[in-house]
Amino acid sequence: MTRRLFYTDHCVLPLPPEHKFPIGKYRMLRELLVKDGFFTLEEAPLAHTATIVLAHDAEYVEAFLQGTLSAGSVRRIGFPWSPGLVRRTLASVGSTLAATREAVATGWGGTLAGGTHHAFAAEGSGFCVFNDIAVAARWVHRERCLQRGRVAVIDLDVHQGDGTADIFRGDASVMTLSVHCKNNFPLRKQQSSLDVELDAGVGDEEYLRVLEAVLPRVWEFGPEFVFYQSGVDGLASDRLGRLRLSHAGLMERDRMMMRGVR
């Protein structure tokens, strides 16, 4: 069976030429995967407001959609507001929701975008407007897709999933794990269910040893649904990531994850 992946680069995000966010990476990744032929690539649908407010403050959602956020709020997000940003943001959440529905139906789903883990319930931050994984997790609960309702969010991006941690703080049905570089954005960390902070310069051997020790604690929680944020900014080639991981190291990381959820 050919697996489906959802993408968002059909919704163009107009950015100034000098903007530091590498928006072209999403199109490049999709084109590489199309050449591989292992997946069916599909355009992500736009998420509906009624679903987004499952995890976000309704006034914040409306202000973003209408372009009435304060200048400070827009500055914290890091993207200039535009109708294109609205469509791209809705597609980003929509892609994760589509992948979630696919996982409920088949056991696995994936998206090339999303992972906007710096978005809090009532504000955006760090190039993140809405927290797609938080919205999708709330959707899983609303639709009663699980018998016991236990969800795990495993965030292996080089930055802490601070928005995700804050949204699910005190929610016993969701376990959040963040393994991240200590000396990196965000400067003010939030408290996940389980945080593992790594020093700058950590390489494959130590990183994989940490994962081997910490992942069993997630499986002990007994999640019926796992959201995996598989960040690649821990690569040594990422000038802002500050870790020293290799492609082989990330591949082994992903294998460890897949073995755990089977």
Image: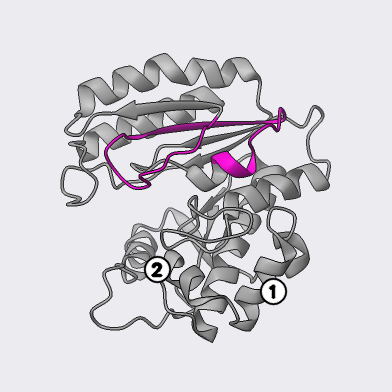
In this image, 33 relative to 200: left or right? right
In the figure, 171 relative to 94: above or below?
Answer: above
Q: Which mark is residue 259?
A: none
163, above or below 50, in the image: above
Give the residue drawn at x 19%, y 29%.
203
Taking the spot 38% from the left edge, 47% from the top edge, the residue there is 186
Label 2 crowd (10 A; few <14 / some 14-19 / many >=20) = some
Please, what secondary structure does the residue beneath circle 1 have?
helix
Residue that carries the numbered disc 2 in the rendered image: 78
Kindly report the distance in space between the C-alpha atoms of the residues bearing marks 2 and 1.
18 Å
Query: Mark 2 vs mark 1: which is more N-terminal?
Result: 1
Q: Position of residue 173 (x, y in %)?
A: 72, 30
Does the magenta stretch mainly form a helix, a strand or a loop?
loop
**Which residue occupies 42% across, 79% down?**
80
Tell me the kind of residue under disc 1. Glu
Q: Nearer the viewer, residue 29 or 183?
A: 183
In the displayed structure image, the side of residue 216 where residue 225 appears, left or right? right
Judge whether residue 2 can be spotted in this image: no
Reading the image, the residue beneath label 1 is 62
Q: Position of residue 93 (x, y in %)?
A: 59, 61
Q: Amino acid at mark 2?
A: Gly
- Residue range highlighted in magenta: 165-192
The front one of 192 and 116 is 192
